[in-house]
Image (cartoon, helix red, strand yellow):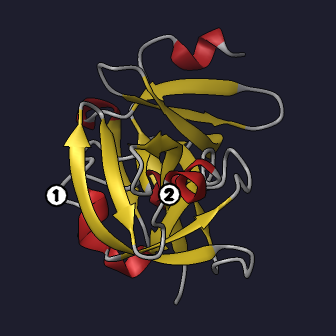
């Protein structure tokens, strides 16, 4: 397996048959079923969205079934047969092989693809690195910066000119006054 990507976190056990309630990091809770195999492990780093390889301490599980319950997914994993086993997994994160992710749509990207990218304006001004992203409910927000400054840029088409995954460069169209406010 190559790179692995963080896709969710186990909130708690669900029921008595070993199912777990998962908070998925995607907008589609049932996407977990499509992966087939997940790896469970402790939080490695809050900002680490992808790892170059699966740590040996992570446990491999096949996804038996998955259903949606609100914004959560109820997941049955092969070999996890009772509530005690499921309770022991609370707080663990789910990781999958990056190759199993469906291709991003046109004008879409995965968070793990842009974190760490160099961010520049259309005029070539270096803003620093994309450090992380967060959700606001209305849209995602890019946190861009260096040790001296930080810029918050909506991750919306009107504020992103181009993403070059090969060169690892994100070209942004900042809001008027954003750059000056952080000088």
Q: In this view, does 38 lie above or below 174?
A: below
Disc 2 packing (10 Å; few <14; some 14–19; many ≥20): some
Residue 167 at x, y = what percent? Answer: 50, 70
**CA distance separating discs 1 and 2:** 17 Å
Which labelled disc corresponds to residue 106? 1
* Residue sitting farthest toward the bottom: 1
Q: Label 1: state its secondary structure.
A: loop
Residue 36 at x, y = what percent? Answer: 31, 77
In the foreground, 153 or 139: 139
Can residue 117 be seen in the rendering of this structure? no
Sequence-wise first label, 1 or 2? 1
Q: Is 102 on the left or on the right of 89, as rendered? A: left
Residue 24 at x, y = what percent? Answer: 39, 46
Q: Nearer the viewer, mark 1 or mark 2?
A: 2
Q: Which residue, given by chain and number where applicable, does mark 2 sit on?
A: 112
Image quadrant in which the C terminus is located: top right
Label 1 close to label 2 by CB (< 8 Å): no
Q: Which residue is drawn at 47% across and 61% down?
A: 113
Q: Is 100 on the left or on the right of 87, as rendered? A: left
Q: Is 177 on the left or on the right of 87, as rendered? A: left
In the foreground, 8 or 81: 81
Q: In this view, does 163 lie above or below 35?
A: above
Disc 1 packing (10 Å; few <14; some 14–19; many ≥20): few
In the foreground, 75 or 4: 75
């Amino acid at each position: 397996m190559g790179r692995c990507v963080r896709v969710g976190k186990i909130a708690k056990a669900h029921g008595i048959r070993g199912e777990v309630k998962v908070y998925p990091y995607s907008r589609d809770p049932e996407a977990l079923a499509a992966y087939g195999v997940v790896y469970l492990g402790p939080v490695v780093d809050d900002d680490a969205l992808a790892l170059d390889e699966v740590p040996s301490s992570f446990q491999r599980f096949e996804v038996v079934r998955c259903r949606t319950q609100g914004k959560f997914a109820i997941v049955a994993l092969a070999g996890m047969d009772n509530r005690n086993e499921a309770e022991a997994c609370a707080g663990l994160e789910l990781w999958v092989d990056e190759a199993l992710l469906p291709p991003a749509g046109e004008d879409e990207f995965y968070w793990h693809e842009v974190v760490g990218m160099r961010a520049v304006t259309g005029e070539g001004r270096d803003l620093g690195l994309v450090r992380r992203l967060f959700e606001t409910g209305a849209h995602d927000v890019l946190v861009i910066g260096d040790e001296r400054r930080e810029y918050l840029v909506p991750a919306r088409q009107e504020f992103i000119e181009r993403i070059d995954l090969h060169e690892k460069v994100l070209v942004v169209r900042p809001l008027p006054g954003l750059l000056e406010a952080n000088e």
